Image (cartoon, grey):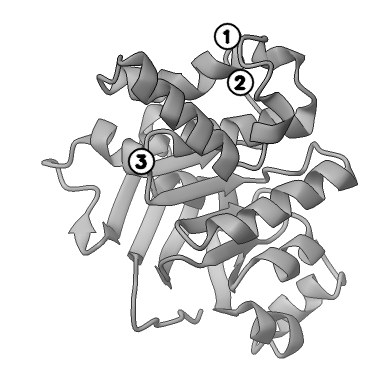
Amino acid sequence: MTTTKTENTKIAIRDLNLHYGSKQALSNISMDIAPKNVTALIGPSGCGKSTFLRTLNRMNELIDNVRIDGSVRIDNVEIYDKQVDVVELRKRIGMIFQKSNPFPKSIFDNVAYGPRINGIHDRKRLEEIVETTLKRAAIWDEVKNDLGKSALALSGGQQQRLCIARALAVDPEILLMDEPASALDPIATAKIEELIYELKQSYTIVIVTHNMQQAARVSDFTAFFYMGELIEMDSTKTMFTAPTKKQTEDYITGRFG
């Protein structure tokens, strides 16, 4: 297993293990995630990619019988420390799921939901946040005249961009994306990929994807997981042209997985 050292690290993971009851799902994961870059997690189904992603915002703790040990440090602060406020932590780390999950509310209320929970109730301020984040999520021009319309009336690709806007509305530093385009058609997928490229100027992004071409297109670094272990991690260019492990090469070239 290799790790990539970056001069500037946003998230540092060391010797991370996770068990669901007696089953070990992650084994001794160590890696550094660079700020304002896209890191793609690839590997066959069930290899631990999504489980690993959810360790970065402590979402696995919502599952019964989970045991986690090792270290995850964000900006050099241990996120599994008992003193850490999990609600505050999750404000800093937005999460986008495979299936878009807008609330059954208006487009406006979806985006304003997080800021309202955080105590912002001034209408003008909320309008500013909604407009700014919908623009940042590249959907403002499509919905600006329909902000009172139900979010559920949007297309799948629009719903996913709305969910990204909702995540951005609380001003996070990190975005975790769990196969954000897997349920979308090629045109909607291309919009999400363009958006990811834009967003990395401002956010650290970690994305789980089954799509090799997508990983190659959108990411700066790629990590290959297999059977709960990190097999190899390097710059995406190196991983796709000259991986050091045969297992990685076999997976990327489609020989297994």
| Closest to the observer, 147 or 185 | 147
Badge count: 3
Sort mark 3 into few (<14), some (14-19) or many (20+) by Cα contacts within 10 Å.
some
> On residue 58, which mark appears?
3
Residue 44's place in the image compared with 33, above or below, is: above
Whole-Å distance between the Cαs marked 2 and 1?
8 Å
Q: Earlier in the sequence, mark 1 or mark 3?
A: 3
The amino acid sitting under disc 2 is Pro
Sort mark 2 into few (<14), some (14-19) or many (20+) by Cα contacts within 10 Å.
many
Task: Inspect this view and state whether residue 169 appears.
Answer: yes
Q: Are marks 1 and 3 in contact (CB under 8 Å)?
A: no
| Closest to the observer, 91 or 110 | 110
SS of the residue under disc 3 = loop
Q: Are marks 2 and 3 in contact (CB under 8 Å)?
A: no
Task: Inspect this view and state whether residue 48 appears.
Answer: no
Whole-Å distance between the Cαs marked 1 and 3?
27 Å
In this rendering, would 176 be left or right of 45? left
Residue that label 1 marks: 105
Q: Are marks 2 and 1 in contact (CB under 8 Å)?
A: yes
Q: Residue at x 41, y 36 (%)?
A: 59
SS of the residue under disc 2 = loop
Q: Earlier in the sequence, mark 2 or mark 3?
A: 3
Residue 80's place in the image compared with 253, above or below, is: above
| Closest to the observer, 54 or 127 | 127
Residue that label 2 marks: 102
Which quadrant of the structure image shows residue 27? bottom left
Residue 186's place in the image compared with 215, above or below, is: above
| Residue 91 rendering spot, x and y as whole percentages | 33, 37
